[in-house]
Amino acid sequence: MAIVRMKRLGLLGLRPDRDRLLNALQRLGCAQVAEPDVDPEDELWATLTKPDGQALDRARQEDDLLRRALDVLKRYDRPHGGALTLRPAISADQLFDPRAYADGLACAQRIVEQERELAALGAEQGKLRAQRMALKPWLPLGVPLELEGDGVVSWIFGTAPAGVAPAELEGALTAASELSCLFPAGSDRDLRYYLLLCHASVEGSCLEALGALGFSRASLRGWTGSAADNDRALADQLAGLEEQARQARQTLVELAAQRPALQRCADRCAQEIAREQAKAQGLELADVFLLEGWVPARDVPRLERLLEGYDCAYALADPLPEQYPKVPVRLRNGPLTRCMNMVTNMYALPVYGSVDPNPLMAPFFILFYGMMMADMGYGLLMILGGIFILARLRPREGLRNFAELLLLCGVSTFAVGALTGGFFGDFLPQLAAILDPDTSFTALPALFTPLEDTMAILVGSLVLGFVQIITGQAVSFVKKFRDGRGWDAILDELPWWVIYLGVALLILGRGNVAGYPVVLLAGIVLMVIGASRSAKGFGKVGAVIGAVYNGVTGIFGDVLSYSRLMALMLSGSIIASVFNTLGGVTGNVVAFVIIAMLGNALNFALNLLGCYVHDLRLQCLEFFKTFYQDGGVPFRPLRIDTKYVDVEEEDRYAG
C-alpha cells in the first residue's frame, strides 16, 4: 500500500514497426508515453522531427462523424435500462476488427447524410410554407398574378394599413378619377390587400391619392397564374417533400438498430486517437523513431517480454530526485483502502517519492463518517447500495471506488448506530407507541445516545481528532527521517510530543506528579530551538513568539474542528426524531410511515453528502497539512479505455 515505483522508459525502434508496437503497448496497458526530454543545445536532437499528424486528424474526423451519427440516433431510438444497464463485454480483437469499423463508418456516413437530407427538406418545406402564407391574402382574386397592364389599363396589386377602411380608400380613389376601380382581396392583422384597375392615363393620380392613405404597390414578380393555382401547386410540392421526409425518418429509425455497432466503433476510434496522440509525443528520424515514457516497476517484466518481439532498443532507469515532480503517480492499495482514491483524487495526488495517504486516512475517514451518520437504518441502506453497484453494474475504477467507500462507510454507520440505538432515528419506538400506547418499548438498547450523552460524545470526538493529528505528526516525523532530515524531524515534531506528555501528566496527576514541569520546560526549550534555528538576530525572538502562538492556537483550532463529529451526529438524530414525531402526531400507522419515511429520506440524502464534505474537510485541512505533499501527476498509461463496452482482459504477457 504505497506509491508505485516507476521506471523511466526510453525506446528506439524502426518506423515500419511503430504502429504495430503502439497497438501492442495499448493492449498491454501499462506504459505511459511522455514528451522526450530534449536538449536544445545538442545538435543530434535538432535532427529529430515530430511525426506526421495526418492520421490523428483523420481519426478525429471519424470520431466527429461517429459522435454526430450517435447524436442523431438519440432522437430515433431511446436506450433501454439507462444507467443500470450493463455494458456489453467484447474481446479486444472484436473491438479492433477493421471490417466492423469500416462498416460502422459507412453506416455513420449514411446516417449523417440522411440527417442532412432531412434538414434540406425541412428548409425547403419552410420556404414553400412561407410562399403559401404570402399567397394566402390573394386567394380571393381569380386573376393571374403576372398581370401589370397593356398600356391602356393598369393592373396594380397593393396593400394598405388594416386600420384604413376600404370605403375610405374607394372615396379617395373616386375623387382622383372615375376611370378606376378597387377590388379587395384578403387581409391579415396588419394589412389589407387590394387589386387596383385604372386607365393608364390616370395611374399616377390614383396612386398619389391612395398613397396618402398608406397604399403601396406589392411585388408579385415570378408568379404566373392565379394565387389559387399556385397555392395548389405548392401544396402538392409540400406533400411530396413530406413523403420524402417520412421516408428519410423511417430510414433513420431502421438505422437506429445499428446504434450498438456505432458505439463500438466510437470506442474503437477513441483508441485510435489515444494511440495517435501517443505517437505524436515521440520523435523520428529517417527510418527510426524515439519514444519515452514511464512504466511501473512491477510491470517491467511484462513490457520486456512484449518488446522482445520487435527490433528495437530500450532502456529502463529509476527517476532522479529532481525528476520527481514530473514522475506520474499511481497508488497501489488493498481492497479496504483503495476506495480512498476517490477522496485523494478530489484533493490532489501526492508527489512521487512522498507518502501515500490512503492507508493512513482510511480508518479515520470511515470511522468519522460512521460517527456523523450514526444510524443503523441509514447504514443498512448504504450497505445495500454499495453491494448493488458492485454486484450489478460491473463498475470501473471511479464508480467502483465510490461503491466500496459507500459500503465501508455503511458498515461503520451501522456499527455506530447500533451503539447509539438509532434506526431511522426513533422510528421503531414511535411505531410501537402508535400500535400500543401502553407499550414499554421506548428505545432500542444503546451504549450512549446523542441527546443524553452529548458532552461525552464531544469529548470523544476531540480525543479522536487529537489522535489523528498526532498520527499525522508521527508520519511527518518518519518521513523527514527517511528523507535525511533527522534534525528537522526532532525539532519540528518532538517538541509538541514532549509538551503533550507534560500536559497529560498535569491533567491525569491533577498536579501531583512532580516531573510534569520539567517535561513541559523541556518541550518549550526544544520548541524555542526549533523555531529559532533558521532566524538571525532579533528575528529569533519573533520566530519563537510566532511559533508558540501559531502552534498553540493552531493545535487548539484543529482539535476543536473535530467537534463537528458530535454536531452532525446530534443534528441527524434530532432531525430524524422530529419527522418521526410529526408522523406520530397523526396517530395513524400509514400516515406515520409515509411522513417518517419521507422525512428520513430527506435527512439521509442531506447527511449522505454533508457527512462526506465535513469528513473530507477534516482529512484535507487538519490531517494532510502535517505531512502531505501534493502536486502529483496522475499516471495515464496508453491502454484500452472505452465508454460503451467492456473489453475482456487478455494479458498475453502476464508473468
Image (cartoon, grey):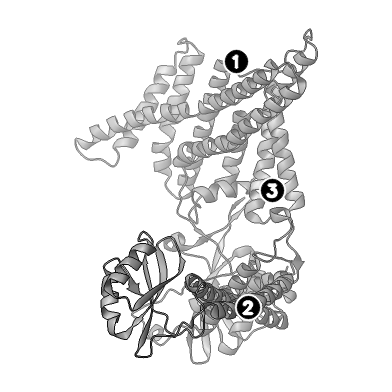
- Can residue 164 be seen here? The reply is yes
Amino acid at pointer 2? Gln
What residue is shown at x 34% (from left), y 28% (from top)?
A: 525
First-in-chain label (2 vs 3): 2
Crowding at mark 3 (Cα within 10 Å: few <14, some 14-19, many 20+)? few
Amino acid at pointer 1? Asp
Q: Residue furthest top?
A: 438
Residue 519 position within the rendered picture, expressed as x and y whole percent measured from the top left: 42, 22
Residue identified by numbered label 3: 335
First-in-chain label (2 vs 1): 2
Residue identified by numbered label 2: 114
Residue 335 position within the rendered picture, expressed as x and y whole percent measured from the top left: 69, 48
Residue identified by numbered label 1: 453
Amino acid at pointer 3? Pro
Residue 623 position within the rendered picture, expressed as x and y whole percent measured from the top left: 49, 38
Q: Is residue 269 above or below residue 432?
A: below
- State how far apart marks 2 and 1 are (Cα): 71 Å
- Element assignment for label 1: loop
- Element assignment for label 2: helix
Q: Nearer the viewer, residue 553 or 508?
A: 553
- State how far apart marks 1 and 3 are (Cα): 35 Å
What residue is shown at x 44% (from left), y 34% (from top)?
A: 494
Quadrant in which residue 41 is drawn: bottom left
Q: Nearer the viewer, residue 74 or 100?
A: 74
Give the total of numbered labels.
3
